[in-house]
Image (spheres, rainbow, N blue to C red):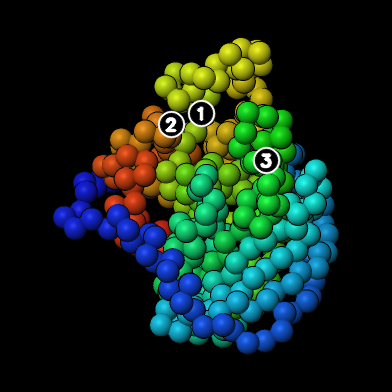
Amino acid sequence: MTRRSAPGVSALLLMYLSAFPAAAGEPLAGEPVKASCRFDPADDDKCSVPDRYRLPARTFDYQLAPRFEMRHCGVTVYDLSFPSPVKSTVPENDTVRAEYFMPRGAAPASRVPGVLILDILDGAAVVSRGEAVWLAQNGVASLFVYMAHYGPRRPPGSRVRLVSPNVELSMAAVRQTVLDCRCAAAWLAARPEVDPDRLGVVGTSLGSLIGANVAAAEPRLKNVCLLLPAGGLVDAFYDHPKAKPYLPLVELMGGKDGLKKIIAPADPLTYAPQLRQKNLLLIAASRDDVLPPKAATALWEATGKQKILWFDSTHVGAAAFALPALKAVAEHVKGQ
């Protein structure tokens, strides 16, 4: 367990500024590539993949379109899209959208590690793109996957959200995102410049909660980094001041115990046995005012007390530690 205090010079804006070169990237010439990818379940029985996240073998079509060349960063960016294996009530949501950040020089002769990246609740993609740029600059192929009902998967004016008081809809969206990510992992593993034995997932805040589910569901993903994580969500939030307005609704669901049963299929703590089998890194904030620190501790203990970094900050204030956090993530997924 490692604890770190605030740096002398704050890196508060680093995460945001690191995404700006993407806007300055030069348009990348070329026509979209249309091809197909095969998903075959990888060791689902051996790795105890949860039943709700099992996916039969399938072949799916995808499109990979050139987006831009970040010459000064050494990163090439593509847009990836493919059909979701799940049908929702929103047609736009049923096309998976992702952005692929490929390191310069990545080639079959020198394969690089690869990761899936999942965003925060805000969903503006600033944090996830910043992480993807950093990792790609440091030799890690990064596939930022939009979660269900996020970004281009949410039509203008839509009120449907992944996280909402409609728990049934939220649980369905989590499941869809996890299955989408299983297909995305198969696509990433098939890339000629990516080492299929060095795949992982990086999730931040909400992305860490969903990322824990993804890691538990996909045996290909061995290196797991959860930033601002939590486990035991109902216990962690039941007495939280921000939860008070929702307590009457909780009572209609059978109270605390009833809600636990409903939430359990998406709670990272449920998948502690699967996460114990991973190379796991947790990065938590000791004064987190959104995801209580005790919830990060509970997940760390349940997953075998693997590596955890504590930063002396609040939830949003953790951005001040972007540089050491990203360094730790890059080293972790590269096996250093």
Residue 8 x, y percent position in the rendering? 16, 55
Marker count (numbered):
3
**Which one is earlier in the sequence, the residue at label 2 or at label 3?**
3
Label 1: which secondary element: loop
Mark 2 belongs to which amino acid?
Answer: Ala
Relative to 239, residue 324 above or below:
below
Residue 46 seen from this side:
no
Residue 82 seen from this side:
yes
Residue 75 x, y percent position in the rendering? 49, 78
**Looking at the image, do the residues carrying marks 2 and 1 touch, with CB atoms under 8 Å apart?**
yes
Quarter location, residue 304: top left
Disc 3 marks which residue?
A: 159
Relative to 101, residue 333 above or below:
above
Disc 1 marks which residue?
A: 232
- Which class describes the residues within 10 Å of circle 1: few (<14), some (14-19), or many (20+)? many
Residue 51 x, y percent position in the rendering? 74, 39
Which circle marks residue 295 in the picture? 2
Quarter location, residue 310: top left
Relative to 235, residue 54 above or below:
below
**Cα distance between the residues tagged 1 and 3:** 28 Å
Mark 3 belongs to which amino acid?
Answer: Arg
**Looking at the image, do the residues carrying marks 1 and 3 touch, with CB atoms under 8 Å apart?**
no
**Looking at the image, do the residues carrying marks 2 and 3 touch, with CB atoms under 8 Å apart?**
no
- Quadrant the N terminus occupies: top left
- Which class describes the residues within 10 Å of circle 3: few (<14), some (14-19), or many (20+)? few
**Which one is earlier in the sequence, the residue at label 1 or at label 3?**
3
Residue 35 x, y percent position in the rendering? 79, 75
Mark 1 belongs to which amino acid?
Answer: Gly
Q: Nearer the viewer, mark 2 or mark 3?
A: 3
